[in-house]
Image: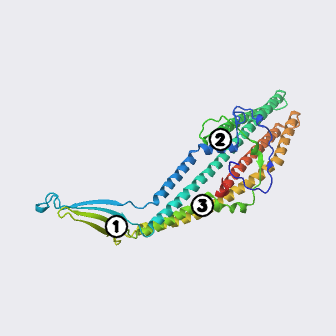
Amino acid sequence: MGGLVYSTMLSSPVLAAEPHSPDAHKYEASIYNNGPVVTLDHAIKKALDASPRLRSAQAGLDAAKGAEDQAGYWPNPEIGFEAENIAGSGNFSGTDSAEYTLRINQTIEIGGKRGARQNAAKAFRESANVDVLAERLNLERDVHIAYEEVLAEAEAVKLAYEMEALAKSVLGNVSKRVNEAAEPEIQRSKAEVAYSTSIIAREQEERQLEIAKQKLVRLWGESTFDISLDHGHFFELEAPAPQESYRQKLANIPDMQRLAFAKAEKQSLLELERAASIPDPTFSLGVRDDRDSGDQAFIFGVSLPIPVLNQNQGNIAKARAELSQAENDARLMELSLEQQLIENWQEWNTAYSEANRLQEKLLPAAEKAFRLARNGYNKGKFAYLVVLDAQRTLFDARSQYHAALKRYHTARANVERLTTSIGEKS
């Protein structure tokens, strides 16, 4: 698929009870009746095509390529001109006794400076290259999570509308029984509070849905949510593979490769600073013209700095410390990535089990309990508190189910980001 590479699973996908079609979302803010359908893959592609984050990373790579080209150039030669014995007094007045010298100077780098500089630039360019790949994976993960958040919030809004309708229905039944003197007035007050609370909850969920929608479209550089989403996969669940199978992939992901190139760059910079302690000779070749005699002669010279006051000790120490820092950063990043993988794998596994358990056992039981409580109340068999408690239990179970699905998709997207290697990315 065009998005994150899905890992091999132990079991086949489990359809976690898609209970409705998109047509069940009839409210105004629906994400299913708002324009052309944008799938998750399409959403990722839109973000990749439009993302300034990705273009910025690509510009960084282009800059690194320029720096690599520059690192291979030799120092430019210098041209020099001297005029002696002019504008003096006596025989040296005017220019008749002048001596003109035209020379070319060339500094020759020795001690491996050019090679070390090229190696550092190459490592920097390779690091920038994996930065582009890492940013691409980050963007795909962010779109994946944002897409699932919109789906989750849409389900929460749908549930809020259902709970509001239930609360309204219960309020009508309670009011009828109060009017018939079958219930005390306080029960109607409780039902009114429950109904008002459901309205507030629905409005809050609608705001959360709007925030999630804006977060998604911003990832592909737009501000208007004029599309529909595909929600079928939101209910598809797969158990994660064994944790160790993911841990083995960590060393090959762009983040770790980037740190390896950073260490290589720092090592080359240390070699460059060591080489800089070796002075570079400058050779001169020129021609001298004697106007007095009309004679000409070639001149040759060489100059070499004397490294007695400055042997580049400070820069060598700095480069050595930066190399040590890069090595420790790499180890710290490795430990951090391992911890992130463990936490997200555990969350994936937990959310998978929780969603299945809720769908198979708790939700059917809560729905049955509420149905029985409401029917029994309408027949005068149960008190209103029984209905209220059953309604709250059903609402909580459905909310927990959708929250588990959201956590499942978020954790899975994070695991896939942490285990997608450079070789797996087309």
Tell me which corner region of the image, top left, top right, bottom left or bottom right, holds residue 251: bottom right
Question: Marks 2 and 1, how far apart in space?
Answer: 68 Å
The single residue placed furthest to the front in the displayed view is 294
Residue 305 vertical placement versus 333 (above, below): below
In-image side of 51 versus 303 (left or right): right
First in residue order: circle 3 vs circle 2:
2
Residue 254 vertical placement versus 28 (above, below): below
Callout 1: 10 Å neighbours few (<14), some, many (20+)? some
Callout 2: 10 Å neighbours few (<14), some, many (20+)? many
Q: Position of residue 165 (x, y in %)?
A: 77, 33
At horizontal 35% and vertical 71% (from top left) the residue drawn is: 307
Total labels: the figure holds 3
Tell me which corner region of the image, top left, top right, bottom left or bottom right, holds residue 258: bottom right
Q: Residue under circle 1?
A: 283
The single residue placed furthest to the top in the displayed view is 179
Question: Marks 3 and 2, how far apart in space?
Answer: 33 Å
Q: Position of residue 24 (x, y in %)?
A: 77, 35
Q: Amino acid at mark 1?
A: Phe
Using the image as rendered, state which of residue 230 and residue 85 is in the foreground.
Answer: 85
Q: Residue under circle 3?
A: 257
First in residue order: circle 1 vs circle 3:
3
Q: Is residue 186 visible?
A: no
Q: Amino acid at mark 2?
A: Ala
On residue 212, the disc is 2
Secondary-structure class at tag 1: strand
Using the image as rendered, state which of residue 163 and residue 182 is in the foreground.
Answer: 163
Q: Amino acid at mark 3?
A: Gln
Q: Is residue 95 visible?
A: yes
First in residue order: circle 2 vs circle 1:
2
Secondary-structure class at tag 2: helix
On residue 348, the disc is none
At horizontal 82% and vertical 38% (from top left) the residue drawn is: 387
